[in-house]
Amino acid sequence: MKLLSFSEGGRESWGAVVDEAVVDLGRALPQYPALADFVGSLDFDRRDDIAAETAGLKLSDINFLPVIPRPEKIVCVLRNYRDGMSTSGEAAEFPPIFLRVWRSQVGHNEAVIRPKVSHQLDWEGELAVVIGKAGRYIAQADAWTHIAGYSIYNDVSARDWQRHAQQIASGKNFVGTGPFGPWLVTPDDIGDPAKLKIETRVNGAVMQSADTSMLIFSIPRLIEYCSIIFDLVPGDVIVTGTPAGAGFTRKPPIFLKAGDLVEVEIEKIGVLKNHVIDE
């Protein structure tokens, strides 16, 4: 099943995608104000029955919001693809992570904003994992039971600001630089998330092409590690890292400019599309 957050007529809601329709579950289930509330509930196991009983909107009539618009935590992982080691350094013993703020996010089909203070805006197509069940000190063997679903993230980065210091968060949190969407796909529709093709295109040209079998730190390992540090809660997002092919690694480097179209496609999930505008 595909679940998403959206706005329609100035009202924010969330729902399920059925063919080309959106089932407005925010209206049908007011006890769950947001998708994050629903994925952490017992009713999440009844999602197919709930969606089937409710009328829908046209998919073309909504505006996509980030899948989880206001997650408590967005944990992003660095240097997590084997094909990227030649340009990103040695693999770490532990997952290198940083945090992104929710206000940096944008939805599918919304604009990525190139900051007026940056001339090195770059793409990073990534698989995102959404937490559905809270936990701390989660064993890898139990990690799968804590996943609500999977989505697509584009960890757009201001490289010049990222290099201001050893800590890179300044280049990762500008407003309008975190595309997240178009929807969450539940695990029953994904199967093994370690066998998904991932591709990033800029104006139709393929810039990144890999599959998630190349992850250095597996999804269960990332959940285990993050849950040692944080209380993971429903709606938290773990962004699992990007493969080789980012713009700053190219010779000469390529950076995003106004008018560019960036598409990140992940097998069994879909395509996240965003155009670029100047601030």
Image (cartoon, grey):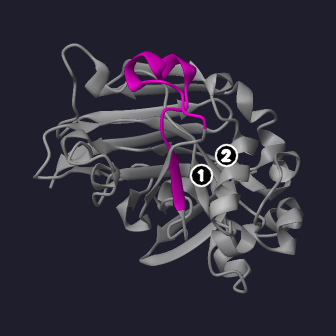
| Percent x, y of residue 80 | 55, 32
Res. 239 in view:
yes
Q: Residue 16: in sight, yes or no?
A: no
Q: Nearer the viewer, residue 260 or 178?
A: 178
Residue at the front extreme, as displayed = 93
Residue highlighted by disc 2: 222
Could you tell me which residue is drawn at 68 percent across and 23 percent down?
213
Residue carrying label 1: 238
Query: x, y percentage for residue 55?
Result: 72, 68
Image depth: mark 1 or mark 2 in front: 2
Q: Secondary structure at mark 2?
A: helix
Residue at 24% in and 34% down: 260
Question: Mark 1: which secondary structure?
Answer: strand
Question: Left of 26 or right of it: where is 134?
Answer: right
Position of residue 143 measured from the top left corner of the image (x, y, whole percent): 81, 51
In front of the other: 7 or 256: 256
Residue 101 falls within the magenta-colored stretch: no
Three-letter code, disc 2: Leu
Dot 1: few (<14), some (14–19), or many (≥20) neighbours within 10 Å?
many
Residue at x 38% of width, y 67% of height: 103
Identify which residue is drawn at 69% across, 85% down: 30
Residue 34 position within the rendered picture, expressed as x and y whole percent measured from the top left: 62, 75
Q: Quadrant of residue 47?
A: bottom right
Q: Are marks 1 and 2 in contact (CB under 8 Å)?
A: yes
Please state if 161 lies on the left or on the right of 266 as rendered: left
Nearest the viewer among 55 and 212 is 212
> What span is in magenta?
74-93
What is the CA distance from the residue labelled 1 to the residue labelled 2? 8 Å
Q: Which image quarter: residue 256?
A: top left
